Image (cartoon, rainbow, N blue to C red):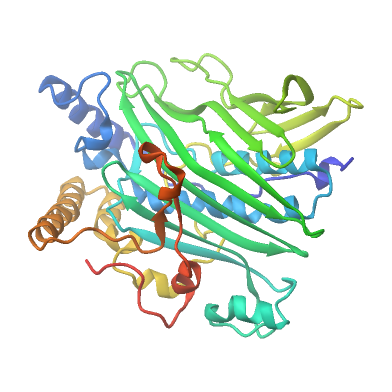
Amino acid sequence: LPSATTMARITPTDDAEPVAVTASNLSNLRKELVQMISSGELTSGSNLTSIGLPASFMLPFSTTSLTLHAAALEAQGMGRVVTEADPLRRMLFILSNKLCATAHTLTASMMKPYNPIIGELCIAEAANANIPGQNDQAGRRKWALLGREPGSSPVPAWRAMVEQVSHHPPITASAFEGQADGGSFAQTVSTIAVPTFCGNYVEVSMKIFGAQSQIHLPDGSTEVYIVKSLPSIYLRGVMGIGPSFCEWAGELLVECQTTGLVGRVEYKPAGYFGRGERHSVSGAVTLANKRDVKLCEISGNWTRSVVAKMAADGAVLQVFAAPAGKQPHVEMADLPKPLPYTVPAHSLLWQRHPDVVWRELTSALHAEDWNAARAAKASVEQGRREEKKAMTAAGQTWETSLFRPDTATGDKARVPWIVREGAFDRAFDRQAKPPCRPM
């Protein structure tokens, strides 16, 4: 069995503390919320997706950027899955990757990212100079469109992309692909984040469908993992009753269709007033046809350490650990700087890249200029309404750039979005035409 040092460990995403959530921001937000409640615009049970929230409620980044950040963190850990020989440990690595992604994407209490405009898209990649196949003909063809000659500089071990494929409902599609030591991996996910106002807290439920990971092992075999459920984010103390904090709560459920293994992690809530332990988890890995037989039990706290105790021999394995002397950035108020991956420079010129779409709003939020923030937010939203009106008048319909609906599933209510043929190559081709529609 692997030692604790060889099991999955999260790494710090930056050395700087995140931007603080200021007292003036919180005060301004609560005043506006009270006004919205008094006017009847906001009631318990309101879906916040369709409500124009005050700019002071906004975090200085888009949901697409946050989704890309999570996808990148998962992709960084997939090499360990590919190279692990034992299927039980591979499942633990899969769970570890998702623990890492949730640990580093828990947003600040009282706040939320921007709602993406339709067609918003962003990409990221990582560097690794030792990808098998980079010096053979097939490898050269695969990475040729990335603008680098194999061997001349590090080539990506993985690449990821995110697109807002629908505005109503707000569906975000993401995908990554990569190679590692004779194997490869790919993942696609479609999610809808549904924020619901519940009085003194907001629940952001994560509706997930079409979440599939394919692992091609060095021996030529393939495994398919399906994510069945994700935990929700809870913003506690929204109206100032009790402490204001943010937590994940609910179940992460992953099934391997190939081996029959099922991994479950329960994110335990601290409660309405935060009296319980925050950020603790428990769970197990079982077989799909024997859910009552636990192959290992999982327990711990993702701000410190999460371990798995093996049923076969009682060995305790570290599945997840915060870096020595540090904790993950709990309740992040901004994306880490520098980012722990590369954002290709050419993508930052796309008119629908989130950094471009929300540049003025982000600047205003960092300056705490709420009037400018409201104006910038309104300008983007009004521009999209005018765009939609013009397209309707011209008889045009929206066409996504990198993803397409997989209508072959037959489930029209939850159609997953899959990668269009050649989309990765087009998105990462530095010489190609921008894949997004002009603003």
**Image vertical order of residue 344 relative to residue 80, above or below:** below
Residue 246: % across, % down: 45, 29
Res. 14 in view: no
Using residue 68 as the reference point, say whether residue 193 is left or right of it.
left
Placement of the N terminus among the 4 image quadrants? top right
Residue 295 showing in the rendered view? yes
Q: Could you say where residue 208 lies in the image, as x and y percent from the top left? A: 46, 38
Q: Residue furthest right?
A: 313
Side of 338 relative to 316 (left or right): left
> Would residue 13 appear left or right of 390 to someone viewing this image?
right
Residue found at x 45% / y 73% = 426
- Which quadrant of the figure has residue 266? top right
The one of 383 and 246 positioned closer to us in this rendering: 383
Quadrant of the rendered structure where residue 238 is? top left
Q: Position of residue 183 (x, y in %)?
A: 74, 61
In the picture shown, does residue 312 fall above or below 186?
A: above
Q: Is residue 99 above or below residue 166?
A: above
Horizontal and vertical percent for residue 409? 46, 44
Q: Residue at x 75, y 31 (%)?
A: 307
Quarter of the figure that contains the C terminus: bottom left
Count of numbered circles on the image: 0
Question: Which residue occupies 17% across, 22% down?
Answer: 37
Residue at the extreme left of the image, as rendered: 393
> What's the residue at 56%, 23% (across, down)?
278
